[in-house]
Image: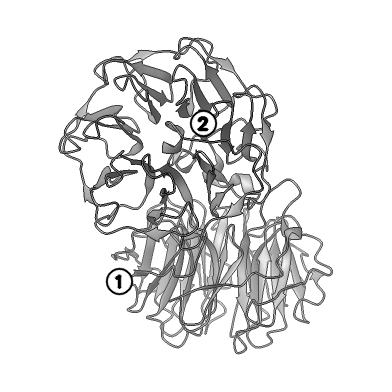
Amino acid sequence: MRPVTPTTRSSLHPTLLTVTLALAACSGGGGGGVAGAGDFQTSSTGLEGGEIVSLGGEDGVTVYAGTAARGVFRSTNGGGAWTAASDGLPDAVIDPLGGLARVMAVAVHPTTTTTLYVGLLRGGVFRSVDGGESWTEATSGLTDLDVRALVLDRSTPATLYAGTLGRGVFRTTDGGGTWMRVASGLTNQNVYALAIAESNPATLYAGTPDGVFVSTNSGTSWSATGTGPTDVEALAVDRFDPTTAYAGTNTGGIWKTTSTGTTWSSSSTGVPSTHGVQALRIDPITTSTIYVTLDGGGIYRSTDSAGNWSAVVTDLHFDDVEAMVISRADPTKLVVGTDGGGVFVSGNGATSWVTSCDGLVGGSVRALAIDPAVATTIWAATRNGPFVSTDNGQNWTLRVTGISDFELSSIAVATNSSTVWIGTLGGGVYQSLDSGATWTARNTGLTDLDVRAIAIDPTNSSTVYAGTDGGGMFVSVDGGANWAANNSGLVNQVVYGLAIHPTATATVYAATRGGVFKTTTGGTSWTGVNNGLNDTALNCIAIDPSNPDTLYVGTVNDSVYRSTDAGDSWRRRNSGMNADTIVSIAVSPSNPAVVYAVSPGDADDARFPGVYVSENGGDNWTLFNNGLAPVESWAVMLSATTAFVGTTGGAFVR
């Protein structure tokens, strides 16, 4: 993925896949009198995983992980367990518009692994000399703080190069004390990747949207290379041969040069062109073995110097792999970072993988559910599996036994507490009958396995509704043993949210990309109810549990609408909002005037709006992010006393 600015990431665009993940929190969120409560507090103990943007450390023992939302984590056992290492990365690294300075790059001293540097998007460079226990800003002379790439000269570790998004390359020769711009000849100043030739460190490669540039004098001057790759996202140089390098592009292509860039040849045989390249890594001993990680496409390996590639067939259940490090002492040891699934480790050359997120708090929460019988039991659907908290969100436990599809989209809990359902994108639905201890896939008759919303009849837990991404509505009346499509009148069959009337449970509302549809017959027939709804591309729907004729919908492009007549008419209610995209809404069960709505930010600007609170039923809204990490918010639920918010940086409570 290419974070030129925080909003160019695909997860922010409302029409793309991840913007619509896990909107179950919209379908009838509970809430409470928490409008005047204090600030949000982090609620991520045990909630592990999250988005890993960068990795550093090649000795097979000490590894550092740079995240999208939680700073830096350190492992001293090859990625087996992690400790937060972000003290001294202050709020100053957060952009004034609200965009978090993502840890885009990590460079570790080759022998003194307690010395390392991180490159931050909109934050510059920070240095630590104690393994991340403390950090010092190292930006003197660095006139562009949008740092995308960092490389370190292993022969002279005080020499580093920073690739920036706007002013090219900077060099320091005193360990970040001062920087000098070295961009002469770089006709494109957006540098997405840097690589240094270990056997001849005066030779550097820079990847830009216009292709690869090469310097043979330590960055003093640069020259465009021959015709070949453009839109370059990743680079790697043969450890022993500075003339041999590989480039990966945003369109999925892989290119190779054996002439320091004078000529390039396409080397993508076996690699799908539908996924952009995230990282390229060369085996430090057997340099004919190369790995490439893809944006949504997993990991591929070549054993013939990029002549041919094949997918690494593993039990790695996450295919959006953003970063990789290989141990120089034992190249069979690999660590990869994923977009939402945290870290995975292989000790056998990528033959098999294990999840390794112990201590890596801040999992990416895409949906929330409150146990209707025990309000202090909270469920979170993350990109690392379902978590449960039994102490009002203070501590979390992962419950994944039986689950093989981890792209969770939605979650719902029955009134008996022990029955829990999750919806996934690609794996259909899973049911647990023992409070998440074990899970079973329940997909008989479910012909569309991309399930975006799930809801349980509150008076009869045998009746379950599943809204899918194109297949419409499926209903099970036998506890998930069988499903049947119920789409009569459902003109738009891309369903993103569900809301069930709390007492007249045959009345169900579906939020689709074609507006609101209503059934009063348990799904056997549907009618569009969109009068006054100017934007019918919907993300979610919530029903007021105290007055079920009042409903709210969150739209893709026009914020919030409210109906007070069971959907017969709608009026826009966005006073005080500066966000168009609303992905989750919750109404208080004890005070219907209190409504929460969350937004991950709009696609066309650099805002991360976060949480909006209304104390008058949606007539007016106030942005309230006090205590929240400045990351994308995706889900909200309310109990009588507590507000829960799910973000890409974990869970928060108020």
Is 515 left, or right, of 620 in this rendering? left
Q: Nearer the viewer, residue 7 or 235?
A: 7
Q: Nearer the viewer, residue 401 or 147?
A: 401
Q: Within the image, what quadrant is residue 348 found in?
A: bottom left
Q: In the displayed structure, would residue 162 be above or below residue 534?
A: below
Q: Which residue is mark 1?
A: 352
| Residue at the spot 45% in from the left edge and 16% down from the top edge | 549
Residue 362, percent from left and from top: 52, 59
Which structural element holds mark 2? loop
Q: Which residue is mark 2?
A: 590
Q: Nearer the viewer, residue 31 or 5?
A: 31
Residue 502, percent from left and from top: 37, 25
Is 372 left, or right, of 245 in this rendering? left
Asked if labels 1 and 2 touch by Cβ distance under 8 angstroms, the answer is: no
Residue 237 seen in the figure? yes
Residue 259, percent from left and from top: 55, 73
| Residue at the spot 57% in from the left edge and 58% down from the top edge | 232
Lower position in the chain sequence, tag 2 or tag 1:
1
Give the colour scheme shown: one colour
Pointer 1: residues within 10 angstroms few (<14), some, or many (20+)? some
Which structural element holds mark 1? loop
Mark 2 vs mark 1, foreground winner is: 2
Mark 2–mark 1 distance (CA, rounded to whole Å): 50 Å
| Residue at the spot 82% in from the left edge and 75% down from the top edge | 178
Q: In the displayed structure, would residue 9 be above or below residue 78?
A: above
Pointer 2: residues within 10 angstroms few (<14), some, or many (20+)? some
Q: Amino acid at mark 1?
A: Ser
Q: In the displayed structure, would residue 190 be above or below residue 412?
A: below
Residue 437, percent from left and from top: 27, 57
Q: Amino acid at mark 2?
A: Ser
